[in-house]
Image: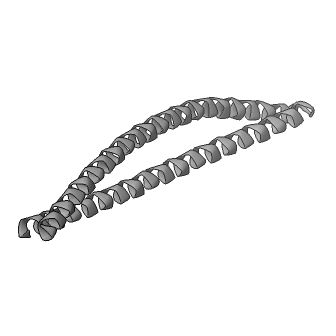
Amino acid sequence: TNSLQERIKRLTGEIQQLKSSKDQMNVEHQQETDSFRHQLQQTRTNVTTLSQMLKHTEERLEVSNKTSDELKVKAEQSSKTAEELRAKLAAQSANHEQELKSNMERVNAVSQDLGAKLNQSQRECMEKEQQLQSASEEIRAVNAG
């Protein structure tokens, strides 16, 4: 009877440990998801800022084209700035797109890994609960018999 009670105590402890591990995995998954969302929002903000800068530069270029020779120099400078911004935007957009893809792959991989661990923990928990139930039935049988 003592060994069964010790077994029950051990199994109960293991179940608690598995539940705690499951909770920790859920916390880690949420933190990873929050981090990815933050990175995604930052990327969107950067793209929006660069788009606004490009639009502003192009508007200045249009105004410059309507003015005198003095403004033609400024128009050339604005054109150069716009081209640089377009190149920078294209490069950063490609980088951000790659970062997004990489982050999505990482989140998916972490999600799948955590899902598998969660499923394993749930299976182990059910097995331990079945063992606990069997041990409890054995104790009842011993006590009754």
Where residue 99 appears, x then y in whole percent? Answer: 49, 36
Q: Is residue 70 left or right of residue 22?
A: right
**Between residues 69 and 82, which one lies in front from this camera angle?**
82
Rendered image quadrant of residue 49: top right
Rendered image quadrant of residue 91: top right
Residue at the image point whose x is 50% and y is 47% from the top: 36
Where residue 113 appears, x then y in whole percent? Answer: 35, 41
From the image, which quarter does the C terminus lie in? bottom left
- Vertical placement of 34 versus 85: above or below? below
Q: How many discs appear?
A: 0
Do we see residue 70 in this rendering?
Answer: no
Q: Residue furthest front?
A: 145
From the image, which quarter does the N terminus lie in? bottom left
- Vertical placement of 84 versus 53: above or below? above
Q: Is residue 58 left or right of residue 136?
A: right
- Colour convention of the picture: one colour
**Between residues 87 and 101, which one lies in front from this camera angle?**
101
Do we see residue 85 in this rendering?
Answer: yes
